[in-house]
Image (cartoon, grey):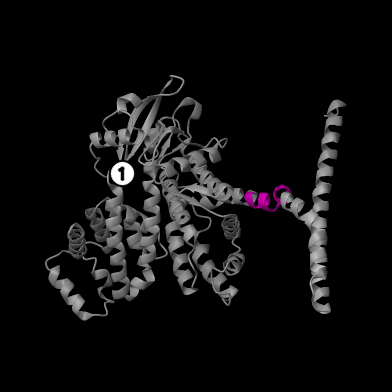
Amino acid sequence: MNRLLRGGFILFIVLRYGLDELVLTSFQKPWLRVLARMISMGRDLTAPRGQRIREALERLGPIFVKFGQVLSTRRDLLPTDIADELAQLQDNVPPFPSEVAIATIERAFKRKVDDIFVQFDRQPVASASIAQVHFAVLKDKLGVERDVAVKVLRPEMLPVIEKDLSLMRMMAGWVEGLSADGKRLKPKEVVSEFDKYLHDELDLVREASNAAQLRRNMDGLNLVLIPEMIWDFCHTEVIVMERMIGVPISQIERLRDAGVNIPQLARDGVTLFFTQVFRDGFFHADMHPGNIQVSLAPNTFGRYISLDFGIVGTLTEFDKEYLAQNFTAFFRRDYKRVSELHIESGWVPADTRVDELESAIRAVCEPYFDRPLKEISLGMVLMRLFQTSRRFHVEIQPQLVLLQKTLLNIEGLGRQLDPELDLWNTAKPFLEKWMIDQLGPKKLLLELRDQAPQYAKLLPQLPRLLHDFLKQPRSDLEERKNLANLIAEQRRTNHTLQTILYLCIGFVVASVALQLLWHLDLF
């Protein structure tokens, strides 16, 4: 019954805000058009379609707001006006009662909240669709009091989410069945993607582990602060972390008055993004202004403070290398290489003409070079690239959706902090250095070190494998061919082992020589 009522309310909101008009032109059944108009008689459709979609999602509640936020990242699927409007969705949700939060904490840790914390603020400091945050004071094992933040999951979230997701899947099926445009938008895939993100956010231990990994990765970079997780008090419904004190990055005038170098802060943000993406392949994928602060403490003055790690993106070594080569070729305006990379990776059909794809990419990208950020829009560039990609049947890679979303977040931050920032020139040296590190001698040594254990295992087995091979009955021609291949493989292995040996000997000789020179006071 509840599901039926919820479905009826969703249908009413869809008709009330005229969302059916988005697909009416491609309805294959005329009677559905007539029925929709009868039910929704008297509605006002003067507002732009993007605004109506945003307002409808806000009326439908927190889960649909979160869905709209995720959907706004899929600019490969949405028109620009709708994607821009959905990007304005704010996750401002009324807090749930503090008594419920306290009950959740006590259930998770099986202790009274006053026995856990020296002080616990009943009034939450932040509230979102998934959880809310309270400040507290915790006494650690050494008896030292620490200021902490306590994040508590909203009660009964999973049943609500499962019901709404079930309805979303059903609605996605309707859209695909009733609208020709709906099939292109891939609503079932979008809902499935949202399902994954949402369930990941519901496990707060996963968020805590994401924060711990980012904290390790960023250690020594001196650009960002990430709260330490208090693992004795981390549960799927509650996590306790170090309390961070900073100024929201949106309060630029306050930061400027405090003496923060705003242009440098903008450049640091670009460096931080590209470091997480290309060095680590593990990046904070929810970098909107609400999750970023700036420290004014004397020992960490001007550093970013990252919060909320429910959504992170990951990239494989192949993804990182492919993207770095694309970015580097793009910054050098080598559009032919960009086209070749798309074909080599299988993103476009193998029979695509390189010169045609090169010309299309040049037409999109060339007008945006040598301009400050205030005169360009990465969102517009991406949108035009996606329009071009559809023409050439480019397959948008799912692992890059979060990267696209984060890049757009970085653009928004850059516009706020320093409209004169030249994103291309800021990022180009970083990427070129990264490419040298990937292709230079340091990378070779790392690869040899990683492969050495495999070669060490393989080498003693080669005589037995060769003996077994020779004992197998085969035709003379095939046997000679396979034997030649095996010998060639053994020679390659021997060559690799010799290379490792020579490198080790060279390293030892160089070390001895350096020590000798040092003792002779020749340095």
In which quadrant will I find the N terminus? bottom left
x and y percentages locating residue 98 in the rendered image: 25, 34
**Residue farthest toward the left in the current orientation of the protein:** 42
**Residue depicted at x 21% and y 80%:** 30
Above or below residue 4? Residue 129 is above
Can you tell which quarter of the image residue 54 is in?
Answer: bottom left
Q: Which residues are magenta?
A: 434-451
Amino acid residing under circle 1: Ala
Q: Which residue is mark 1?
A: 128
Instruction: Give yes or no for residue 449 being in the magenta stretch.
Output: yes
Viewer-nearest residue: 474 or 350: 474
**Residue depicted at x 70% and y 48%:** 446
x and y percentages locating residue 199 in the rendered image: 38, 51
Above or below residue 515? Residue 496 is below
Instruction: Give yes or no for residue 76 being in the magenta stretch.
Output: no
Q: Residues within 10 Å of mark 1 (few under 14, many from 20)?
A: some
**Residue depicted at x 23% and y 58%:** 56
Above or below residue 182? Residue 231 is above
Q: Main secondary structure of the magenta part?
A: helix
